[in-house]
Each structure stands twice: as structure tokens, then as C-alpha cells.
Image (cartoon, rainbow, N blue to C red):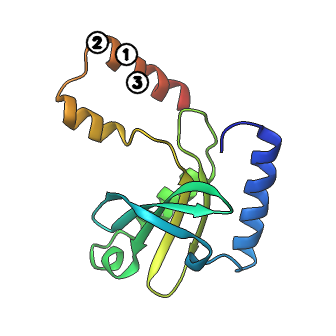
């Protein structure tokens, strides 16, 4: 959700109201392709109203099996309470019988962990850049 912040705020508020009213579902999104995988599920590039999002689909059964319910609730609550330009914003969260869904702004480039794995070690200037961003976000 970059660009005009008034549009962003209105769009986010409308989306959150839709979720609170139980009107949003996975069928509202067009899943384009998988952009990441993890222990609990997959992350998709998803389209809603012509805009791209990263949609994280978490399997409830796996979360329960691994006893990570509190961890996932905390992740969602922390992300819902944080708005910062150096953190990918949580747009909305909803669920169905099988899955939990976390919808984020889509930001190309991937996770810092993937970049670090690829590089093995960051040069000092790159490491300082990321440290500064994380510090400011906190």
C-alpha cells in the first residue's frame, strides 16, 4: 500500500471492516503464484481489486500439531498493531475451517533471511543499513 496515504488508510479501513463483518474470504482473491513456503503453509502473490498482495495461508491443523497457536496469535496481533515504512504492513487477517490467512502489502525482494542465506554474510555497509532500518522500526 504505497503512494497516497489517504487512499491507503481508506482501503485498509474498508478491508478491515469487511473482515470484521465476516465478508472477506479466500475466494475474493485471485491466487497468482506461490512466492514462499514455510512450516505452516505457503505465501501467494494474490490479487484483489487489481492490487497485488502477499497472502500467507497457514494450515490450522499444522499450527495445532506443532503447538504454535499462541505464537501465531501473537504474530498477528503484533503485526496488526505496527505501521512502519520498514516493516511490511498487515492489511487484513481472516480464516475459514482449514486455514488462517494473513494478507500483507506485496513488496518485491523477499525476506532478509533469504537474502542473508544467499549472500552468506552481508558487507558492513549492507549490514549497517538493515540494522538501522530494524532499529528505527523498533
Q: Residues within 10 Å of mark 3 (few under 14, many from 20)?
A: some
The image quadrant where one finds the N terminus is top right
Q: Which mark is residue 124?
A: 2
SS class, disc 1: helix
Q: Is residue 92 above or below residue 122?
A: below
Q: Nearer the viewer, residue 84 or 42?
A: 42
x and y percentages locating residue 130 in the rendered image: 40, 24
x and y percentages locating residue 75 in the rendered image: 48, 57
Residue placed under numbered mark 3 in the picture? 130
CB-based contact (under 8 Å), mark 1 and mark 3: yes
Q: CA distance from mark 2 to mark 1?
A: 6 Å
CB-based contact (under 8 Å), mark 2 and mark 1: yes
Q: Residue furthest left?
A: 120
Q: Quadrant of residue 63?
A: bottom left
Q: Nearer the viewer, residue 37 or 17?
A: 37
x and y percentages locating residue 6 in the rendered image: 83, 42
Q: Residues within 10 Å of mark 2 (few under 14, many from 20)?
A: few
Q: Is residue 80 above or below residue 110?
A: below
Question: Which residue corresponds to the image point at 19% horizontal and 24% vertical from the top-left?
Answer: 121
Q: Quadrant of residue 30?
A: bottom right
Residue placed under numbered mark 1 in the picture? 128
Q: Is residue 137 left or right of residue 8?
A: left
Amino acid at each position: 500500500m504505497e503512494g497516497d496515504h489517504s487512499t491507503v488508510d481508506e482501503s485498509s479501513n474498508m478491508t478491515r471492516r469487511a473482515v470484521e463483518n465476516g465478508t472477506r474470504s479466500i475466494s475474493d482473491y485471485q491466487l497468482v503464484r506461490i512466492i514462499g513456503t514455510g512450516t505452516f503453509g505457503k505465501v501467494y502473490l494474490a490479487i484483489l481489486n487489481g492490487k497485488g498482495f502477499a497472502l500467507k495461508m497457514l494450515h490450522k491443523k499444522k499450527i495445532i500439531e506443532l503447538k504454535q497457536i499462541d505464537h501465531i496469535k501473537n504474530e498477528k496481533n503484533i503485526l496488526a498493531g505496527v505501521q512502519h515504512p520498514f516493516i511490511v504492513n498487515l492489511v487484513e487477517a481472516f480464516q475459514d475451517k482449514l486455514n488462517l490467512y494473513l494478507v500483507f502489502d506485496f513488496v518485491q525482494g523477499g525476506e532478509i533471511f533469504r537474502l542473508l542465506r544467499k549472500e552468506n554474510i552481508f558487507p558492513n555497509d549492507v549490514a549497517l543499513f538493515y540494522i538501522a532500518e530494524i532499529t528505527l522500526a523498533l
